[in-house]
Image: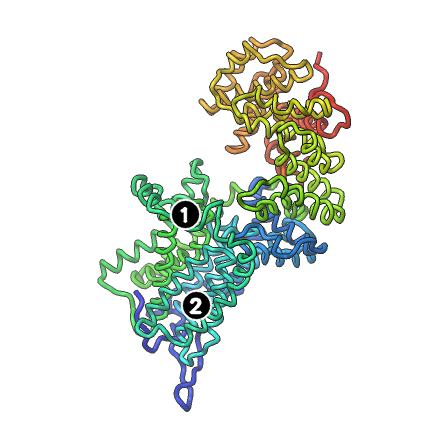
Amino acid sequence: MMMPSGNTPAVHGNVTSQVGAGGARRVPVAPPNATGDGPPPAINVSLGGFLLLFVASRLLYVVLIDPSYLSPQLYDELYVGTIAQELVTGPTLPFADYRTNNYMLGTLMIGTLASGFFLLFGPTVFALKLVPLLLFTLALAIWCWTIQHAAGERVAGYFALLFCFSPPLLTAYSTASPCCHGESILFSALTVFLLFRMLSEETGSLALPALLGLTAGVGLWFAYIYGLTLLAALGCWLWHDKGRFWQARVLWFALGFAAGFAPWIAINVQTHFAGLVIYDKAVWKHFGLAYLWDGLAHPWKLAPVEFLRTIASDDIGDRYSRAVNLFYSLLYIGPILTVGVLRLKTGQSAPTGPRQTRRMLIGFCILYLVVFALAVQFSDFRSAHYHVPAYPFLFFLTAFSIAQCQELVPLVRRQIQTVFLASVVVLDLGAHAPLLSLDRPGLAFSAKGYSYAILPWTYFGIHAPAGSGDRQFILELVQRPLLSDILPKLSSDDQRDLSRAIALLLAKAVPLNGQAGEFARFEGLVPPGFDRYFYYKLGVKAMVRHPNELYKAVAAVEFVRHRSPTAYQLALVGIYRTWPVVGALNSSPESLAHSPAPVAPELSPHYWRALGLWAGRYWYEKDPSLSRLNAHLQVFVPRLDPSVQKYFLQGVAQVLFTYLSADNWVLAAELEHFPHAYQEDLLEGWGMALGEDELFSPYPWKGQESLSWMTATKGFSARSLVSIQQGKAQFEAFFESPAARALEPPLRP
C-alpha cells in the first residue's frame, strides 16, 4: 500500500519549502475532493462545526445519562477526582505518590487537569468529565486536520461524523477520567500528524522528529497501549525511508523520546521498576501462544471477532445489545468490504502519484489495526475497554471507503451519502436511548466528584512492599500520613469517608492469633466512632479465612468476647453475613433448616438471615428465575417456625440484591409479585442489602442521593419504598447506635 519516498507530497496544504539556494516552490498536496473526479456531494460542515457537535452531544449525554451508567469505571474516576481535590486544597503527599498505579502514570496528569476544572466549576462529577471531553475534542481536531490534507475534506467530514456519533462504548469512555486508554487516542492523533508532516517535509527540519519522539515518550508512560501506535509509526517510517532510514532525524527522534520518557524512568528507578508489573504479573507474562490456540479452538474468541462482537456494548448477554453490535459492525465493515469487491470487479487500483500521502495514511491505519489485533490475540488483555484506541483508525478506513464507493459508483453518489448519514444518526440514537433517563437529569452537576475512601486502598496497593507482611506497613500508613496529615484538614463528610476506610484497612491487617497486645495496636488506631466497622469486618475476615468451616471462624474471634460483648456480637454478625456468600453449596437448605446450629438468642435473627441467603443462592444459582424462586419459597417457608420466617425471607432478598444488581435492576420490581405475606419481609431484606452496599461503598453519595439507592429502588411502588427504607434504616442503626442492640425492630403483632 505504501510507496517508498520520492518527492512525497506534503501533508498540509500550501506548505512552502526552500529548494537549493534560491526560490521557493509549492509542495503538491491532495486536493479537497481527492476521492472523486468531479464535484461530489460533501458535508457542508466546517471543522469548528463538528467540534461543536461533538462537545454538545457529549454534554447532552452527561446531562441525560441514567445514574446507573454514570461512568464505566467510577472507582478510578473518583480517585482521579481525589487527586484533583488534593491539589486544590493543598497536597499532603509527594506528587508522584498520588498515582493510581505504577503502569498508568498519566492519571497524575489527568488529575492535574481536573484540578483546574474543579477550581472553575467546583469538585463535581461534571467538572471531572470535562477532562476527557477536552482530550477527545483535541484528538478529533488533529485527526480531522491530518485527514483533510491527506485524503480530502469529504473523508475528513465522514470521519468527524463517525467520531461524533460513536458507539455507546466509545461515548462512555470519552466522558470518563481516566479514559481507560482513551488518552492514547490523543497521542495517536499527534503521532500521525507529526509523522506525516515530517515525512513530507523537504527542508529536513529536525524539530519535527524531536517533537515526534517527545510525543512518543510521553504517550508511552501515559498509557502503555500507545506502544501499538508507536510500533505502527516506526513501521511506516521504516518503509517510507527504507535504504536510508539512519539519518540525523532518527537521532533527534531518539533524543525527544528519551526526554519524554524520562519521568517514567525517574519514578521506576525509585520503585524497582514496578511499572513493568501489570495486575501482579510482569508485562511479558501477559502474552503467549496459548491465547492464540484458544482463539483458534473457539473462533468467537479471536481478537477481530471479539472486537466486532463488543464494538458498541460489552453486555453481549442482552439481545438488544447484540443487535446493536451487529448493526455497528455492518456499518463499519460493510463499506470496506464493498470497496474491495467493487475494485476487484472494475479492475481499478488505488491511485498513485500526488495522492501518495493518502495511500500512506491508509497503510498506516491498516498496519495499526493488524498490530492491534495481534497484540490482543496473543495476550490476556481481552476486555472491551482495551479496544478504545482502535476506533479512530477504523473510522478513517470506513470514511475513506464510503468516499471511494461514491467515486466507483458515481450514479448513486448522493444516495450513498444519504443512506450513510441516516444510518449513522439513526443507529446512534437507537443505541444510546436505553442509556438515557429523565429521572435525574443533570445529576453530574451536583454529585461530588471525589472520594477520600478510595485514597488509603490505592496508596496501599501502590506502596506496599512486595514480598513482605502488610501489617507493619498498614500501621505506619494509618499513623502517617492518613491520621496525622490528611484527616485533620478534611470536611466532616470527607472525614467520615476516610475514617471508615481506615477502620476497614486496619481490619484487613489485624491478626487473628488472640494476642491481646498485638490486637490492641490496630484497635487503638481506629478513628473514634468507627470501631463497629472494624469489629464487623473482623468477623468477615475470619469467615473468608475459613470459608467452609463456620465453627473455626467463630473460634477465631472468640478472644474478642473478653474485650467487649458488643465487639464480639458485631464480629459474629460479620461471620453470619459472610458465611453463605463464601461457603461452598454442599448442603441443601432443607438439611440446614432441619438441623440448625446452636446460637445465642440475640444472634438467632442473623443466623436465619444467613440461612435465607444460603437457600436463595442455592436455588437461584441452579435456576436463575424469579418465578421458580417464588415457587421454592411457597413450599419451603411454611415449614419453618413462624418466629424465624421473617429473617429467612430477609436473607433471601439479600441474595437477590446481589444477583439482580449484576444482572438487571429492572427485574428488582418483580419482588412485588411475590405472595403478599412475604413482600414486606423481602423488601426489608432488600433494604438491608442496600444499606450494607451503601455503608461499605467507597463512593461519597449517601441516602437517596446515592447511585445505589437510585438504581436499586427504580420501579418500586411508594409502599414498597417504605419497607425498603425501614430495612435500610435497621442495618444502618446497627452500626451507628452507641450501644449494642438487635439489628431488627420488635416483631410485628
Compare marks 2 and 1 and give the one earlier in the sequence.
Answer: 2
**518, above or below 450, in the image:** above
- What residue sits right under mark 2 in the picture? 148
The kind of secondary structure element at disc 1 is helix
Mark toward the viewer: 2 or 1: 1
The kind of secondary structure element at disc 2 is helix
One can see residue 229 in this view = yes
Q: How is the image coloured?
A: rainbow
Identify the residue at horizontal 46%, vertical 77% (top origin): 206
- Quadrant (top left, top right, bottom left, bottom right) of the C terminus: top right
Point out residue 647 in the picture as x, y percentages from the top left corner: 62, 17
- What residue sits right under mark 1 in the picture? 285
Q: Farthest residue to the right: give it.
A: 738
**564, above or below 476, in the image:** above
User: How many numbered markers are drawn?
Assistant: 2
Residue 520 image-quadrant placement = top right
Identify the residue at horizontal 50%, vertical 45% (top origin): 432
